[in-house]
Image: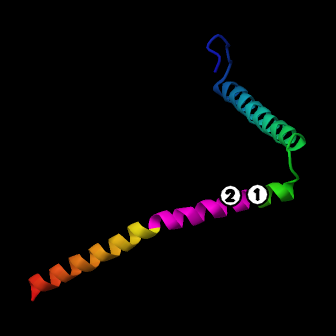
Amino acid sequence: MNPNRIYYSREAELQAARERSTMTVFYVVLALAAGALVALMFAPESGKEMRGDIGQRVGGGLESGRHALEPAVEQLGREIKDLRDRVENRLS
């Protein structure tokens, strides 16, 4: 709130704050819409092509992530089996 502004009631002060907040949200939404419009105008590919390209990249990333994690998962499985065997040996 503006410290130099004089409000004659708390209600008037709150109303002014609500109006400022509403206008701020409006301008942010307007700026986002304008940015999206400009991005669509200058996009090098059509939406269908771009979605396909993004899907291929995400799929490739997931596949390489699976390949990277596979050895770690196998090692973890071996360690769990070894730990289970040691616990069973101590209990028996």
* SS label for mark 1: helix
Query: Principal SS element in the magenta part?
Result: helix
For the residue carrying disc 1, how many other residues have a C-alpha within 10 Å: few (<14), some (14-19), or many (20+)?
few
Relative image position of residue 28 (x, y in whole percent): 75, 34
Say what amino acid the circle numbered 2 marks. Arg
Say what amino acid the circle numbered 1 marks. Asp
In the picture, the quarter occupied by the C terminus is bottom left
* SS label for mark 2: helix
Horizontal side of 53 relative to 67 (left or right) equals: right
Horizontal side of 20 relative to 69 (left or right) equals: right
| Residue 78 sits inside the magenta stretch | no
Q: Residue at x 82, y 42 (%)?
A: 36
Q: Nearer the viewer, residue 82 or 37?
A: 82
Q: How many marks?
A: 2
Q: Range of the magenta residues?
A: 53-69
Relative image position of residue 61 (x, y in whole percent): 60, 59
Which residue corresponds to mark 1? 53
Horizontal side of 5 relative to 34 (left or right) equals: left
Vertical order, 49 against 38 (above or below): below
Where residue 52 sits, quadrant-wise, is: bottom right
Q: Residue at x 16, y 79 (%)?
A: 86
Which residue corresponds to mark 2? 57
Vertical order, 81 against 64 (above or below): below
| C-alpha span from label 1 to label 2 | 6 Å
Vertical order, 90 against 70 (above or below): below
Relative image position of residue 38 (x, y in whole percent): 86, 37
Horizontal side of 84 relative to 26 (left or right) equals: left
Q: Residue at x 85, y 44 (%)?
A: 43
The reply to whether dot 1 and dot 2 touch (C-beta < 8 Å) is yes
